[in-house]
Amino acid sequence: QKEVEQDPGPLSVPEGAIVSLNCTYSNSAFQYFMWYRQYSRKGPELLMYTYSSGNKEDGRFTAQVDKSSKYISLFIRDSQPSDSATYLCAMSVGGGKLIFGQGTELSVKP
Amino acid sequence: DTAVSQTPKYLVTQMGNDKSIKCEQNLGHDTMYWYKQDSKKFLKIMFSYNNKELIINETVPNRFSPKSPDKAHLNLHINSLELGDSAVYFCASSLGDYNTDTQYFGPGTRLTVL
């Protein structure tokens, strides 16, 4: 069993929809939780970063961490075609070693 | 100005060959990383260096050898290439606080071994 599980999709939604992306993990020592966005043939870029349970909002994006359930989510409101990308969750116990989920491929249709 | 750059962008080579990938960052960061992304988009850390010192060395074959001539550069040399080495290799860098730092990724090097 992988330390971090993420449904690879693909996920296709109409423009304007609310998107929910999720990851589960098994290592209770994870303290730092991130979401990266990766456009096709590009490197990942950091979207959201949290280190505690709860919600964090940044524009149309909300990251949610539930450490008791070992579950993290990323919500995208009013999704746009430009949001079409692969979304990778990543976690760390510290020390710079990020453990990534497989990534969910999202397509937002106009 | 590209923050983290890699060369080459594409690399096609025969099994058994030796090849190198170069990475440079102009962000003034202290820590650099190499990641491998397989065909299923699974991204896995291979190595990290902090100020030219090896910090993370995951269980990768010893055919892979990172080299950091200075803290702005981290190169990856691969000996005796195998079919399974085909992947996209990403370099990344961060400021130096392992726990809270954002890791900035390069554009990737797509390696195809024939």
Image (cartoon, coloured by chain):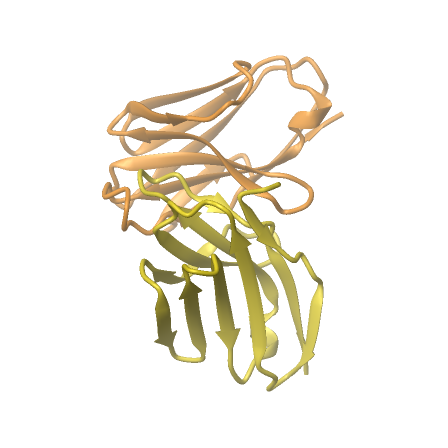
To which quarter of the image does residue B68 belong?
top left
To which quarter of the image does residue A60 belong?
bottom left
Residue A82 as seen in the image, left or right of residue A29: right
Residue B47 in view in this figure: yes
**Chain identity for the colour yellow used in the image:** A
- Along the viewing direction, whichever of A53 and B84 lies nearer the viewer: A53
Query: Where residue B37 sits in the image (x, y, percent)?
Result: 59, 40
Query: Where residue A74 sits in the image (x, y, percent)?
Result: 49, 69
Above-or-below relation of B34 to A56: above
Query: Where residue B18 sits in the image (x, y, percent)?
Result: 59, 15
Query: Where residue A29 sits in the image (x, y, percent)?
Result: 37, 45
Q: How many marks?
A: 0
Residue at (49, 60) in percent of width and height: A71
Above-or-below relation of A20 to B12: below
- Along the viewing direction, whichever of A60 and B27 lies nearer the viewer: A60
Residue at (58, 14) in percent of width and height: B79
Residue at (60, 63) in percent of width and height: A85
- Along the viewing direction, whichever of B72 and B50 lies nearer the viewer: B50
Residue A20 as seen in the image, left or right of residue B33: right
Residue at (59, 51) in percent of width and height: A5
Residue A38 in view in this figure: no
Q: Which residue appears farthest toward the front when viewing the image?
A: A68
**Chain identity for the colour orange used in the image:** B
Tell me the quadrant of the picture where the C terminus of chain B can be found: top right
Residue B98 as seen in the image, left or right of residue A27: left
